Amino acid sequence: MAGRRCATMVAMSTVRTLDDHDAVHDEVVTTLRAPELAVVPTDTVYGVIADAFNPKATMALRDAKELAPTAPLTVLIRSPRQVTGLVSEIPEAADRLMASYWPGPLTIVLPATDGLTWDIGTRTAVALRMPTDELLLGLIAEVGPLVCSAAARPVDEPPHTVADAQAALGDSVALYVDGGVRDGRWSTIVDLTRDHATVLREGAIAGDDVELVAAGRVGWGEVPQAEDHSE
């Protein structure tokens, strides 16, 4: 495993702060198009990102994190309108969840469109999220959809700071962006590839709330209140 990791290491990492947002944006875009990896602060934890449609970049991300070739990767988008081109079917439950929780820490797994030239670990499904982070949304607008995963290996703690990410991934990442401390909450993941919503991982959003929204038990674009749980 160590050999695989060394094979993808870059010469030396660079660290930038968000003091000059526009300059950092441009530098991250250049890095992603190289194609190399960047670590950026997200609305959950620090994430390592790569161009979703560049297999060389997604392979480098897996090598850096020591993931299996079939490990599924989350794809970040900047608008619910982008979902149409990436999935084969959008159930009403997905529309309801996007209206209530996007942008935000909810990852929705949907059936993937056939024939997309990417390597996200599976051909049949795609995990999508729309973040709230301004830097990430701007990067997606310029580069396109990005794969994103916590900037840590499976054995590491969630990366709350850029130092956590550097300790885990080292020089396998070309550019680190320091945006201060993140709260460290994972996104909640819900699977909508079947005929009902299944919460795969509970994170910043309660699983019970996700299920209520998906089932249409609250108004469009609303989130559950205490009384919704007692009905």
Image (tube, grey):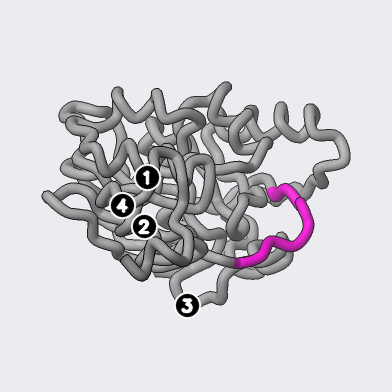
Chain-order first, disc 1 or disc 3: 1
Chain-order first, disc 1 or disc 2: 1
Label placed on residue 97: 1
Relative to 202, 27 lies left or right: right
Residue for point 32% across, 57% down:
212
Residue for point 36% across, 70% down:
230
Q: Is residue 183 magenta?
A: yes
Q: Are marks 1 and 3 in contact (CB under 8 Å)?
A: no
Relative to 104, 218 lies left or right: left
Mark 3 Cα-neighbour bin, 10 Å: few <14, some 14–19, many ≥20:
few
The residues colored magenta run: 176-184
Residue for point 64% across, 42% down:
133
User: Where is residue 64 shown, x and y percent of the image?
Assistant: 49, 58
Chain-order first, disc 4 or disc 3: 3
Location of the N terminus (image quadrant): bottom left
Mark 4 Cα-neighbour bin, 10 Å: few <14, some 14–19, many ≥20:
some
Residue marked by disc 3: 155
Residue 97 in view, yes or no: yes
Chain-order first, disc 4 or disc 1: 1
Q: Are marks 1 and 2 in contact (CB under 8 Å)?
A: yes
